[in-house]
Image (cartoon, grey):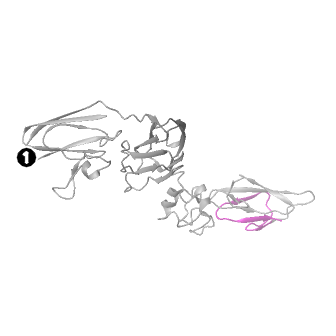
Amino acid sequence: MNWAVTFSEQLGNVVMYVRDRVPPGQGISPTDYKDWVDDNKNHSSAYASYDPPGAYTFTNPPVRPGNTYFLGFRAINDATFSVSCNTNGGYIDYTNTIPFYGGTLNTSVPSHATLKLRIDVPADARRLIMNFTNVSAFNLYLDQGAVPARNGSDPYSAIAQPNPVLNQALYNASGWPWLPNYMYFLFVTNTSASAQNFAFGVNGLNCATDDADSDGLPDCWELTYWSNINSYGPNDDPDGDGVKNIDEFLEGTDPINPLSFHPRLVVNAQNGTVNRNPAGTLTTNVPPKVWYNLGQTVQLTPVPNAGYNLLGWSGDASGAANPLSVPQLHRPPARPH
């Protein structure tokens, strides 16, 4: 993949700058010019600004597939210039794409042969997990935005390492090159004199599934309310509303607001049962409790065993109404007797 840019000057003098995703421009001072020299996204000696005028051809790297590029021109003095560009020749032969969510590959690699694979990481990605199954004869190289250089500059490599695992967060804005919404290129080589089996899986995670501390609470949900995923656990109740964090998460309520909860209705019966309408939703408690929406009215109908009758209600209910309507404004226990 070659990108050819040609500019010429009819009058005066200009300098050309290049940048991807955002235009080149001025930084904090009049002479602080920002372009791909400052970004330096991949291993390449081609990052520069361009003067004198002429034809410049860029390959990968520094050109990164799937990105929009901007050209900027700074006039040293009054100037008239022209610019043209085109693409020609060359391509990145990493055409075997492995899905980010649940992608797998299981194959036999011939002696001294290679695999060239691409993982397109989506914009909502939060963590890249890759589990490899291979003998030590394999060397693995992974780069983002460019084909691996295989010279020690790639952000990830596993040399003669059996069954390596990559578990890499993608959510740190300053964590370049580990970011979402980019192409990642994987180069695999079998260095042995015989064919070898090679397998790997991509377990991509997003906000709904990334749980680095394996506590059942997605990290994104925890960081919405606290500064650290280890601040509280699933069984903690930091707002004191009687509902533990795991249930606040599952029920979509706010774990730091004591007024945001689903009331629990506990009904105990002796010598019979009590039917609820509606039935409610079970919590994760052992034994489970039943929750309802705040303000919802629940109808309780006693069903006495043979030879028994309803005498009345106790606990947070009283009287002998049958059925009994209970508004869910807090967490009342009710007991027929």
Q: Nearer the viewer, residue 317 or 154?
A: 154
Above-or-below relation of 178 to 119: below
Residue at left offset 79%, top offset 61%: 321
Secondary structure beneath disc 1?
loop
Q: In which quarter of the image is the N terminus?
A: top left
Q: Which residue matches tag 1?
A: 77
Q: In this view, does 24 lie to the left or right of 128?
A: left
253 is within the stretch colored magenta: no
Res. 82 image quadrant: top left
Q: Which of 34 and 241 is in front in this view?
A: 34
Q: In this view, does 167 lie to the left or right of 264?
A: left
Q: How many other residues sit within 10 Å of disc 1, few (<14), some (14-19) or many (≥20)?
A: few
Residue 32: percent from left, percent from top: 19, 55
Residue at left offset 42%, top offset 46%: 142
Q: In this view, does 69 lie to the left or right of 186?
A: left
Q: Residue furthest top?
A: 89
- Residues shaded magenta: 313-337
